[in-house]
Image: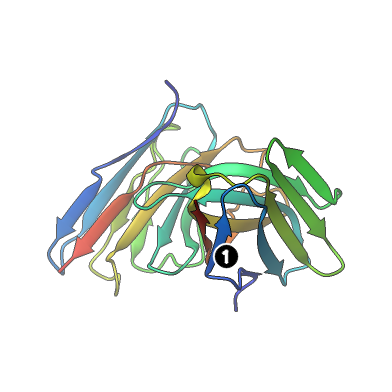
Amino acid sequence: DQQVKQNSPSLSVQEGRISILNCDYTNSMFDYFLWYKKYPAEGPTFLISISSIKDKNEDGRFTVFLNKSAKHLSLHIVPSQPGDSAVYFCAASAMGGADGLTFGKGTHLIIQP
Amino acid sequence: DGGITQSPKYLFRKEGQNVTLSCEQNLNHDAMYWYRQDPGQGLRLIYYSQIVNDFQKGDIAEGYSVSREKKESFPLTVTSAQKNPTAFYLCASSVAELYEQYFGPGTRLTVT
């Protein structure tokens, strides 16, 4: 049973446009959500996070939106740059986070020139 | 330079052999984690430790063992009981009270 779902295995976006990556979750106990970026054969890099008490968090070109009623979050990247091409993982945690994160399967973002 | 190191980057073993993957961090983080990634899959939690000399099983602990004798170190042993050991293994750490985990570069284990 997959508790965190990223239904788009890949996404192609033109350089300079907005990239929108989506994530759905099923566990109502999740209270913190994170996005990680990963290049092949490397460890994931933390990008941005959001607590369930907020509905938006922004950091430079990256914004995460949380819709608790729909159990849905999205990552917006504006403007998209070639270096943004990578796999993006959505992750979630419940009750303090010290017992590990639950990850989605990832979305491969390809930025086209 | 603070960070998490995993060694080696690539590891090859014969079926039936135990193998230990190294993970060291100098971030002074209390919590450490081991995940496994398979092609087209997300990361799955194997074991985690919130404090020295204590650790808990994650979602896929069968066939693995860990130890946490020092705050800086959290080695993972892949035993011969693990049915599908070939995978990319990632170690992470975090401050105990915070959610953000920071990852090492990973070890790709191939068992033939």
Q: Position of residue A61 (x, y in %)?
A: 68, 40
Q: Position of residue B83 (x, y in %)?
A: 29, 75
Tag 1 residue: A104
Instruction: From the viewer's perspective, tell me whether residue A85 is left or right of residue A25.
Output: left
Dividing the picture into quadrants, the one containing residue B50 is: top right
The residue lying at 75 percent from left, 47 percent from top is: A50
* Image x and y of residue A62, in percent: 68, 43
State the residue lying farthest toward the top.
Answer: B1
Corner quadrant of residue A19: bottom right
- Asked if B7 appears above or below B108 in the picture, the reply is above
Specify the farthest residue to the front. A113
* Residue drawn at 30 percent across, 50 percent down: B107
Q: Is residue B18 visible?
A: yes
**Display colour scheme:** rainbow
Q: Tell me if I can see residue B32 in this picture.
A: no
Q: Is residue A34 left or right of residue B93?
A: right
Quarter holding the C terminus of chain B is bottom left
Front-lying residue, B4 or B70: B4
In depth, the one of A16 and B107 nearer the eye is: A16
Q: Quarter of the image containing the N terminus of chain B?
A: top left
* Pointer 1 local density, CA inside 10 Å: few below 14, some 14–19, many at least 20: many
* Residue in view at x 61 percent, y 68 percent: A6
- The answer to whether A30 is drawn above or below residue A61 in the figure is below
The chain identifier of the residue carrying mark 1 reads A
Residue at the far left: name it.
B14
Q: Type of residue at label 1?
A: Gly
Judging depth in this view, the residue of A56 and A84 nearest the camera is A84
- The mark total stands at 1
The kind of secondary structure element at disc 1 is: loop
